[in-house]
Image (cartoon, grey):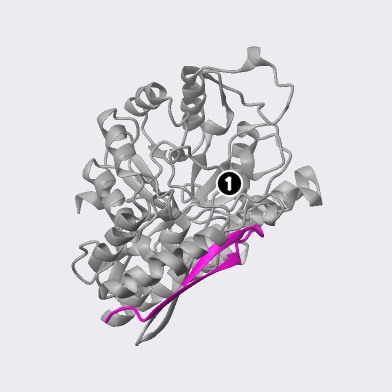
Amino acid sequence: MSITKIKARQIFDSRGNPTVEVDVHTEKGRFRAAVPSGASTGAHEAVELRDGDKSSYLGKGVSKAVSNVNDIIAPRLIESKLAVTQQKEIDSLLLELDGSPNKGTLGANAILGVSIAVAEAGAAESGLPLYAYLGKLAGHTGDKMTLPCPAFNVINGGSHAGNGLAFQEFMILPTGASNFTEAMKMGTETYHTLKKVIQAKYGLDATNVGDEGGFAPNVSGAEESLQLLSEAIKKAGYEGKIKIGLDVASSEFYKEGKYDLDFKNANSDPTKWITGQELGQMYSDMIEKYPIVSIEDPFDQDDWQAWSDFTQNTKVQIVGDDLTVTNPVRIKTAIEKKACNGLLLKVNQIGTISESIQAAQLAQSDGWGVMVSHRSGETENTVIADLVVALGVGQIKTGAPARSERVAKYNALLRIEEELGQNAEYAGERGLSAGTTPPSLLKQ
């Protein structure tokens, strides 16, 4: 069945910034998708098209991207008579219409909105839930499907918070849960325990939440944050069952070949900036002391040598985000340089469902772990919950268990687990790579 109508509009994301929403109509009904937006964005990401008119929405309007859907994509896609189930062909047509290497002509936000809405329509046409339909597109066989271990971002720093903390995210991963429902129980209980721990130490106003629902207490640095997490995990009764993940987002504080952990201070002392090697040693010390299983973007997106040196000598998962930007070309380079052993998969970094599937499979072909991710500017759209189950990669990060645009994804996963029943398997730590050891999920 082909598309009868496509309509895009400007809506708002969880930060109050404009974003793109797309409706695709077929004889089966209307299928809607909304596009997220990042705050700490990699220099090599696909282009999110903004209007740039400072007198309107502070330059962040998306009327150009909306027009590109309504005036360019819609007529061509309807005219093509492609069936909604031809996801790959439709995504290829979108790339062809754009014609640029980074989706800068039409905008990745325009292209992705259409790609997701088409997937929703394709699932309905096939009579399948979205996760099962995407699984089919990704080559999944059999009835069993894997529910991911969630990585809850519970302490915020970096570009996401107004405190002095350089590292962007401190996450808790309930690897010891027996199913996704229990993982949510463990995660939420630890989150609420952490809130009490922080309030007791820093006062009531220290538990205001950041863009992704995590707390941003006025801690002195990473060590203090890790101590808070360890205390909360212990008090909640989950020591040994909940591990820790970091998203350092170090490109945010890379200056003149060094790393400035005091980058939010305009007068930071350049003599205290550290080398990639010194930063790597800091991570190694933390891994020895705390139950850290995953570190994302430990070094700058172009500091390839530091990545390669560290990844070869670590026993945890090292995830590329700004480094790889879900882009097959960057992933191939990272594979060649042995720069990391994990991929952060953000659909809006690459711009279509088909390319997202391709990026995940490319990373897995080299034994990497894959963590599907939200963005800091989110919407109520829950496609990433379906995608992570479809790909069977066993890892998702979509914020703290707070703020509805985050919780929507976790709630979607609870429903998927319930629907799958006996066919649902929980990943636990099996989705994580560890140094040179691939995720055990991959070996099955």
- The single residue placed furthest to the top in the displayed view is 271
- Is residue 369 shown left or right of residue 296? left
Above or below 437: residue 254: above
Residue at label 1? Answer: 39
Question: Quick check: is 128 in the magenta stretch?
Answer: no
Residue at point 48% right, 29% down? 300
Above or below 35: residue 434: above
Residue 402: x %, y % from top left: 62, 61
- Is residue 267 shown left or right of residue 178? right
Above or below 200: residue 27: below
Quadrant for the C terminus, please.
bottom left
How many circles with numbers are drawn on the protein? Answer: 1
Residue at point 27% right, 71% down? 80
Residue at point 57% right, 61% down? 63
Residue 145 visible in the snapshot: yes
Q: In the depicted view, which residue is nearer to us: 174 or 144?
A: 144
Amino acid beneath label 1: Ala
CA neighbours of label 1 inside 10 A, class few (<14), some (14 to 19), many (20+):
few
Q: What span is colored magenta in the figure? A: 1-22
Q: In the depicted view, which residue is nearer to us: 162 or 79?
A: 79
